Image (tube, rainbow, N blue to C red):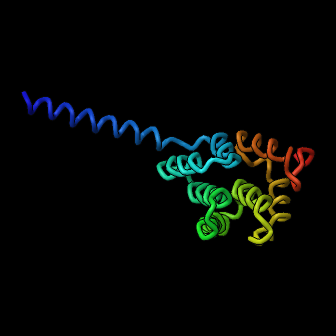
Amino acid sequence: MKIKLFISLFVLTGFLKNSKAAHLQRNVDRVAFYSILKGQKVDDIDKEILVIEASSIDEKEAYKGALLMKKAGLVRKPKEKLRLFKQGRIKLETELRNNGSNTEYHFLRLIIQEHAPEAIKYHAQLEEDADYIKKNYKNLLPAVQQVVIDYSKTSKILHSSDF
């Protein structure tokens, strides 16, 4: 009897773990991702990084890079800020170097560049990214197009009239 109970619990535990893992491996909700990127909560960023790491999306490293750079602006310790920003920049720039035709990557970099402090000196491709996004906007997924439109309402470099 004890053996049957043990086996039943073992099977049930395995099933629950697998269903949770399957849930996390779904595609990342881009609207939720951009909402978290816009937000001010480190906990939300950390949770989204876990979702992204468990997903199977191609944009995984670029998304993590953008989130790490955003997180750098929210933590208090200067050493931690610098570490997170560098780590995120390397991830995003590597993805841009490997897939420079991905318009969404240019949009992620533009968001970070536009909000990065001057001391970081991460603004060199701001105009280039803005131009690329304007030219290739129609190639974005509809959900991301809407995020770009929403972002352009408060951006100093992108304007809703550009689209």
**Residue 127 drawn above or below residue 161:** below
Quick one: quadrant of the N terminus?
top left
Q: Residue 118's quadrant in the figure?
A: bottom right
Residue that sits furthest to the front in the current view: 76
122 relative position to 76: left or right: right
Q: In the image, what residue occupies the spot 70% across and 64% down? A: 100
Q: In the image, what residue occupies the spot 50% across and 50% down? A: 50
Q: In the image, what residue occupies the spot 77% across and 58% down? A: 115
* Residue 67: x %, y % from top left: 62, 55
In this view, the residue in front, 69 or 16, is 69
**Residue 142 drawn above or below residue 83:** above
In this view, the residue in front, 36 or 143, is 36
Q: In the image, what residue occupies the spot 77% across and 40% down? A: 146
* Residue 80: x %, y % from top left: 59, 66
* Residue 138: x %, y % from top left: 79, 46
Whether residue 127 is visible here, answered yes or no, is yes
75 relative position to 140: left or right: left
Whether residue 95 is visible here, answered yes or no, is no
**Residue 43 drawn above or below residue 3:** below
* Residue 76: x %, y % from top left: 63, 61
Quick one: quadrant of the C terminus?
top right
